[in-house]
Amino acid sequence: MKSEDTRSSASTTPNPLILVLHGGTSTERAVSLQSGAAVLEALQGASQSGAWAGRAEAVLIDADGRWSFRDEVLSEDQALLAIPPGAVVFNALHGGRGEGGDIQSALENAGVRYTGSGPAASALCMDKASTRDALMLAGLECSPGHLVVSLPAEAEAMAVLMAQLNGMNTDGHGWFVKPNRGGSSAGVQRVTHSEELLSAVESIITSGEEALVEVAITGVELSAGVMGRSEAELIAFTPVEIQPRQAAWFDESEKYDDKNGAREPCPPESVPALVVEEVKLAALTAHKATGCYGYSRTDFIYSQSGCLIVLEVNNLPGLTPRSLLPLEAAKDGVSFLDLCLAILSLAQDK
């Protein structure tokens, strides 16, 4: 994908009004604020310089769910009615209703165009256990896992559950315990000892979430973004390798700490070129298997035994200064501005 191609395709609508939707009520609100600020800065700067003919305005969803738009604080229904005809919403929300399909459904019902995947794909990708099923059905490999919906009250049933979870950990590397509908590593726990496993599961269940327990896989962590309309037009960006500096895994501090966060070489340093191509193909497969539209990013582990394991499909990947998708796009000659314009062009063609 060349930068001049993205700019021309994004300008099919003369002088478009772009509303950058960010903030939200989820645990990923802080990340969304950063993504939204970065997109606004790029689009408004391009508008002011004449590099882009459109206009970009902020729409902020407050932590209490109210929408701030043009100096007014509105309910969601009021805000949707206030969106001018022809405007396009750049969805920079992460997690919760903004990434899980609810906002997408509301925008569609209001007749408003928006960026990213539709309601069904968004809901699927937000549900990690269901995503695993879709990926494995498409021939991709996932780590052994088990979804804990609730903890049994009977001691015998609890013993059976814990034996099942312990039995998955045959290589002794431990588990990851995750909220089934979370992102940005929020609430994720790395557990190395079986006596800690029940506590980790309980903490997620008591928060009102389901707990997905997956076996920890040792290897090289990789990520690849995908962009395009139809299957024939999809492209995969050059993958990035993730090398945590401080933590044993890619946690929130490794993702977002500008000074001490993970090293992210692109292209990867620790796997051969054949594996890089395998990752790109697998990212395309994951994008299609989950029904994503426009763009996505899929995370992997290339295991010590030589298997490519899918970790997660991100239907609204971050666009912060520390995010992986812009890094991958830049490696392939697509600037951050042109990445934003390409995302917008796909929304306009929905």
Image (spheres, rainbow, N blue to C red):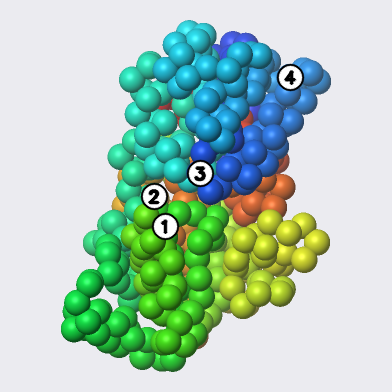
Looking at the image, is mark 1 or mark 3 earlier in the sequence?
A: 3
Label 1 neighbour load within 10 Å: few <14, some 14-19, many 20+? few
Looking at the image, is mark 3 or mark 4 earlier in the sequence?
A: 3
Query: What residue type is disc 2 on?
Result: Met
Looking at the image, is mark 2 or mark 4 earlier in the sequence?
A: 4
Label 3 neighbour load within 10 Å: few <14, some 14-19, many 20+? many
Q: Which structural element holds mark 3?
A: loop
Label 2 neighbour load within 10 Å: few <14, some 14-19, many 20+? many
How far apart in space, not on screen, are marks 1 and 3 (Cα)? Answer: 13 Å
Is the residue under label 4 in contact with that under label 1 (CB below 8 Å)?
A: no
Q: Which structural element holds mark 2?
A: helix
Residue 249, position in %: x, y? 59, 73
Q: Nearer the viewer, residue 315 or 235?
A: 315
Q: Which residue is mark 4?
A: 47
How far apart in space, not on screen, are marks 1 and 2 (Cα)? Answer: 17 Å
Residue 199, position in %: x, y? 43, 75
Q: Which residue is mark 3?
A: 26
Q: Nearer the viewer, residue 102 or 279?
A: 102
Q: Which residue is mark 2?
A: 126
The label shown at residue 207 is: 1
Is the residue under label 4 in contact with that under label 3 (CB below 8 Å)?
A: no
Q: Which structural element holds mark 1?
A: loop
